[in-house]
Amino acid sequence: MERCRMVFSGSGGQGVITAAIILAEAAVLHEGLVAVQSQSYGPEARGGATRSDVIVADSAIRYPKVIQPNVLVCLTQQAYGKFYSMIRPGGLLVTDSRYVKLEKKVDARQVELPMHASVMERIGKGIVLNICMLGAVIGLTKLVKGESIMKVLEKQIPKQFLEMNRKALELGAELVKDIKVC
Amino acid sequence: MERCRMVFSGSGGQGVITAAIILAEAAVLHEGLVAVQSQSYGPEARGGATRSDVIVADSAIRYPKVIQPNVLVCLTQQAYGKFYSMIRPGGLLVTDSRYVKLEKKVDARQVELPMHASVMERIGKGIVLNICMLGAVIGLTKLVKGESIMKVLEKQIPKQFLEMNRKALELGAELVKDIKVC
């Protein structure tokens, strides 16, 4: 497999760190891959846009920080404004279509998805937006299976919330099912 | 300040990743420092001992992975067996006195603390063991103030759990109050 370097960005409380950790654990514990997940906080962290990095590969990862992501997800306009320029040429930029207005030219495939609107309409709980985002990311990249994500969630969250998370994951996959990345 | 490189280790579910993220956010958002927090998962992650790294500094951090921690916390025997040898000479090794039997010689100050036993006796909820551990770590290192940790928790957890977390943090500080590190 090609090494997949991802950055998930948004505002604090949208769960981008949690999403990155879940993805890393799914890859390592259930798909035999290796992963590094990190947060770097500098003075700019006090601004508002949060960023979380995850690298998934099938061989040792030497440098754990993402410089140029293959996949960049931006859930807010502020995160987009701050991070859009780091996308790897030929990469994939995923944005929330309600919260991000695309203003910049990038050498990457841009995918606008109504993640927040769909989560609110179909599930009614904004808290699973990050899981819907994960569903979209794995739907686009085929990086790990949805069931591997669910296995991680089954160990980490109370039973009564599992169904809601499963719906959010499937919703994300559904949003991208007709989108060809290559 | 000296750069502080820390590794928190234990078993999955003990919250060592959460503790590292809370510490990093407290340092950055409330103390004007910079921080990097990461998880590296290789094939050994499928074994059982979980590890989480955090570096806190007052100037840019170039390499985000911890090779030799100044502070190594081990909450289980398995984590201790796996990670004890990485401690930086002259560093600080903190273990849970019920769950870890010290068997190895290390060139570091060893501090055994009854964290789990005290949490169970005084609070009765094992889930805040990681916060007690954080209280002990910041009590020993003076890296960030307890109130900075509380500010992060106030934003992240439901109100009804705040008091329990505050107690756990204070309990950790109390366990180390007579321990001189230097």
Image: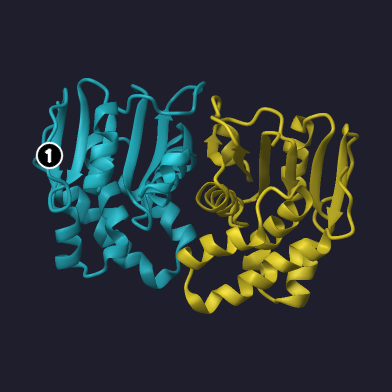
Chain colours: A cyan, B yellow
Q: Position of residue A35 (x, y in %)?
A: 47, 33
* Residue B68 appears in the picture as rendered: yes
So how many labels did they put on this image?
Answer: 1
Q: Which residue is mark 1?
A: A102
Residue A143 located left or right of residue A42? left
Q: Quadrant of residue A142?
A: top left
**Rendered residue at 78%/76% (across/down):** B121
Location of residue A46 with respect to B66 vertically, above or below: below
Residue type at tag 1: Leu
Disc 1 residue crowd, few under 14, some 14–19, many 20+, Cα 10 Å: some
Residue B91 located left or right of residue A176? right
Q: Secondary structure at mark 1?
A: loop
The residue lying toward the viewer, choosing from A81 and A108, is: A81
Location of residue A136 with respect to A33 vertically, above or below: below
Q: Position of residue A81 (x, y in %)?
A: 23, 38
**Rendered residue at 28%/43% (across/down):** A79
Residue B110 located left or right of residue B149? right
Q: Quadrant of residue B174?
A: bottom right
Q: Quadrant of the C terminus of chain B?
A: top right
Chain under label 1? A
* Residue A144 appears in the picture as rendered: no
Q: Position of residue A103 (x, y in %)?
A: 12, 36
**Rendered residue at 42%/39% (across/down):** A27
**Residue furthest bottom in the image:** B160
**Residue furthest left in the image:** A178
Q: Quadrant of the N terminus of chain B?
A: top right
